[in-house]
Each structure stands twice: as structure tokens, then as C-alpha cells.
Amino acid sequence: MFGLDTVVVAIIGLAALSAGALGYGVLYSRIEVERKAETRVKRVKAAETDRSKATAARDRLNEANKRRKSVQDSLKTLEEKNKENDRRKSPALKDRIAQAGLTISIQQFYIFSAILGFVTGFLAFIFQGNLYVALGVMIIFAVGIPRWLVGFLRNRRMKAFLAEFPNSLDVMVRSIKSGLPLNDAIRMISAEGQEPVRTEFKRIVEAQQMGMNIPEACARLYTRIPLSEANFFAIVIAIQAQAGGNLSEALGNLSRVLRDRKKMKGKINAMSMEAKASAAIIGALPFIVSLLVYLTSPEYISLLFTDSRGHFILGVSLVWMSLGILVMRNMINFDI
């Protein structure tokens, strides 16, 4: 009985296997077609996804190219303006008076210079009694001294601007991070900053009130303060207006760069101090020796001032001394 059951089970199993094989053989083509169709559908979906990704990537690339082109155009415009300003290496007297922080007009400057020259020349004529000496003194105090004073005040104001400008940028960075717009940050500096940065930022605010946008108003800062640091600030503002981005981070990086430049200038000045001292000693040595010789033996050196050949020697020596001082000055001065 047990053997009969085993045979029956085996027959049933073989029959089921045969039926399955027959069904698979009949349905194989349909299953294969469905499988290929499913594979093609997946491939089409993947192609559509890749196409959308490629389109998105292409759009991002086009947008980046547009932003890059706008930034390049703005930088090119700023560079052309800066080249135009740099062509005038010696700015006009009116611009130098404004850069020195003086509020007088060019006519008032000429009037004051003429009065100063006339008064000093008159005093020199009274005390010396020599007309040529009086004319020399009058020319020096009417032409040389006032312009030197304007240059001195201008350089001092530029140094004060460089010393305070990074601090003002830090205040702007904190203001922008706290949520204030750029206009309010500039107004804050114009109201609470230190001179001369406060005055220059007031002019930026006034230019905005006259209808200028922020990049144009900041670009005018370089014309009033012809320093590379002011030019950097104008470029950062122009790039942010054209391409967007994190303004607080850009201004923070600019402040850090300006402080690093200041440190580098300090290191260079410290390293070149020995050369400057040597140049000052060498330049002053002929005058010191001449003074000592005059104090000890005035008859010996008086020929230089009373004889025509001495005048010629003094003239040639003065020319060569001037050339030597200029060469030493160019050797010890470094631009960063």
C-alpha cells in the first residue's frame, strides 16, 4: 500500500512538472515580450530623467554664464574708469584741495597764496634789503608752501581713512548680519563713523538721494579717495549688485584683506627702516660737513659762495645730490 502511494505521488508530481513546463513553453514568448517592454519603459523613464537633469544643468550653466558675463562687464567698466582716473597721476589742484578735506574754493586758495607770498616777501625785503631774496621768498611762500601744505593734509587724510576704513567695514558686516539692508548700514557709518570715513559715506548717501544707485555712488568714492582700498570696496558692491551673493561675507573678506595689507605695509616699513636711515644719513652728510667746515674754517669754504667757479660746483653738486636722493627714495619705497 505504501509503495502504491509513493508511485501515485510520483506520477502526480511528474504530471504537474510536465504541465508547468508545457505552460512555460507556451507562455515564454509572452513573458519575454512583457519583460522587454518593461525594460524599454524603464529605459525611457531614465532617459526622460536624464534629459530633465541635463536641461536643468544647462539652465544653471547658462545662468552662471550670464552672471559671469555681467560681472565681467561691470569689472571692465570699473577698470576703464580707474584707468581714466589713473591717467591723471597728478590730480588737479581743485581735486587735491577736496581730497585734503578743505572747504575753500580754488579762487580762495589763490587769494590766500598771493597774500602769504606778498606778506613774507615784504618782510624778507624789510629785514634783508635785497630785492632778489624778497622775490625768491615770495615765490616760495606763494607757490611752493601752500601746495606742499595741501599735499601734506591730503596724505594725512588718506592715512586716516585707511586706518578707519576696516573698522567701518566691520560695523557694516555686523549690521548686515543683524538684518539691516546695505542702505541703512551706509547711513549708520555716515552718522556714527569716524572722520574722514563719515564724511565720505555722507557723500555716498547724498548721491543716493540725488538719484544714483548704490554701485554708482560707491564708485564715486574712488574719485574722492584715490586709494586701491576704496576701489576694492566699489568693486565688491558692484559685483554684489550684479551677481548677488553673501554681501556680509564679501565685506568681511575685504576687511580682512585690508588689515592684512596694513600689516604687510608695517612689516615692509620696519624692514626698510635701516635703509631709510642710511639714505637719510648719506643725504644729510654733505650739508653737515659743509656746515662744520664753515664753522671751523669760513675762509676756506667761502670761495664756493663768492667765486663763479664755486657757484658752478655748487650747481653741479646740487643736481647730483638730487639725482642720488631720488634714486635712494625709489629704492626704499615699496608699493603693495
Image: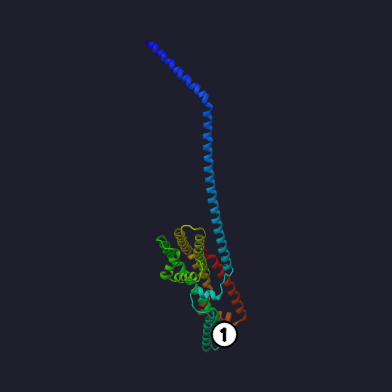
Whether residue 300 is visible to the viewer of this picture, yes or no, is no
Q: Is residue 109 above or below residue 251?
A: below
Total number of numbered discs in the rendering? 1
* Front residue (pair 243, 108): 243
Indicate the colouring scheme.
Answer: rainbow
Q: Is residue 288 above or below residue 77?
A: below
Residue 219, horizontal then vertical, whole percent: 52, 66
Residue 96, horizontal then vertical, whole percent: 53, 74
* Front residue (pair 197, 287): 197
Q: Few, some or many C-alpha atoms within 10 Å of disc 1 (few <14, some 14-19, many ≥20)?
A: some
Which residue occupies 37% across, 11% down?
2
- Identify the residue at the far left of this view: 1
Q: Quadrant of residue 316?
A: bottom right
Residue matched to label 1: 135
* Front residue (pair 78, 7): 7
Residue 43, horizontal then vertical, whole percent: 53, 38
Where disc 1 sits, the SS reads helix
Residue kind at label 1, given as amino acid type: Leu
Whether residue 22 is visible to the viewer of this picture, yes or no, is yes
Quarter of the rendering occupied by the N terminus: top left
* Front residue (pair 50, 110): 50
Which residue occupies 43% across, 15% down?
10
Residue 303, horizontal then vertical, whole percent: 58, 81
